[in-house]
Amino acid sequence: MHQHSIRKWQHAHIFGQDITRAGEKRTLIVILITASMMVVEIISGVLFGSMALLADGLHMASHTAALGISAFAYYYARKHSKDESFSFGTGKVNALAGFSSAVLLVVFALIMTWESVHRFMNPVEIIFDQAIIVAVLGLVVNAISYFILSGRHNLNHSNANVANNQDHSDHNLRAATLHVLADALTSIFAIIALLTAKYVGLIWMDPLMGVVGAILVARWSISLLRDTSSILLDKQASIELQNQIRNSIESHNGNKVADLHIWAIGPNLYNAIISVVTDAPKQPDHYRKMIPDNIGLVHTTIEIHKCDDEDFEH
C-alpha cells in the first residue's frame, strides 16, 4: 500500500471512510446475539433429537455468515481508507458488501420456495408445540437485532430524520437489516402457519406461508440489488441532483454546462466531472463555489471552455 504525505496543493481521497461507522458497532452486537442463539439451537437440536431446533439453528448460521460479510466490509473499508490504489477511496466496499448480501437473500428466497413446494407435495409430520417455541424464540431474537440495527434505541426526535437518511445510504447496514427482517418474517409466518395448522387443521398453511415469505424476501433483495449495482456500475446520480448542480452554475449569466457526469463513490458521497462553456472564463474554484456544499459532492473536476460563438445565449 503506497502512501505519501499530502502537500498543500494536493488533497486526500479518504472522504471519511477511516471513521468507524455506527452501523459497524450495531452489526457486531447483532452477530454476537445471532451466533449465540445459533449455537444454543444447534446444540439443543443434537442433544434432544429435535430436527426443528437443528434446522432453525443452521438457518441462523446462514444469516450469521451474511452479517459477517457486513462486519468485514466495514473493517476493510476503514483499514484501507488511505490506500491510494483506490481511486476515490473505499466507499464502494459498502455497496459491494450490500450487493453480496442481496445475492445471498435471493438464494435464501429460492431455498424457501423450493422447500415450501416440496412440503406441498410431500407433507411432513410437525411437532407443533416445540416448533412454535422455536419460532417465538427466533422472533424475539430478531426483534432485538432489528431494534439494534435500526438505531432506534438511541435516536431522539431532532436527529431521527438525519440518522435514518444516513442509514438508508449505508447499503451495508441496509443489507444486514434486511437479513434480520427476513429471519423475523420467517418466524412470524411460521407462527401463523403452525397455530393455524394445530388448531384448524390446515397443514398446507405452513408451506403457503413459506412461499409468501420467499416472495417478500425476493422483493427486498431485488430492490437492494438495483440500488447497489447502480453504484458499482457508476450509474449517473439522480436527475434532481444533476439539475441542482446544473442550475447552480447556469444561474449566473454567461455559463452553460456542456457536459455533466456525477456518480456515487460511497454512502452519500459523490464525484463529478463538469464541463462549463462560458464567454468569460474564470478559475475552476469560481464555479466550484457556486455548487451547494450540502449535497455530498466530495470530489469535483471542472473544465472550462471559452465560447466565441456570437449566438451564445447569456
Image (tube, rainbow, N blue to C red):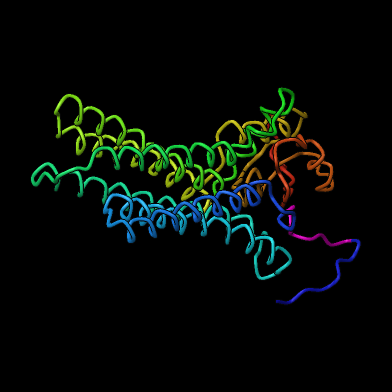
Q: Is residue 188 left or right of residue 269?
A: left
**Count of marks placed on residues:** 0
Quick one: 173 or 42, which is closer to the camera?
A: 42
Residue found at the very far bottom of the displayed protein: 2
Residue stretch rendered in magenta on the structure: 9-16
Q: Is residue 311 visible?
A: no
Instruction: Find residue 236 and report its image quarter.
Output: top right
Residue found at the very far front of the displayed protein: 48
Placement of 80 over or under 171, stated as above or below: below
The dominant secondary structure in magenta is: loop
Instruction: Find residue 12 and report its image quarter.
Output: bottom right
Q: Position of residue 1 (x, y in %)?
A: 70, 76
Instruction: Find residue 204 and report its image quarter.
Output: top left
Residue found at the very far left of the displayed protein: 121
Asked whether 108 falls inside the magenta stretch, the response is no
Q: Position of residue 48 (x, y in %)?
A: 31, 56
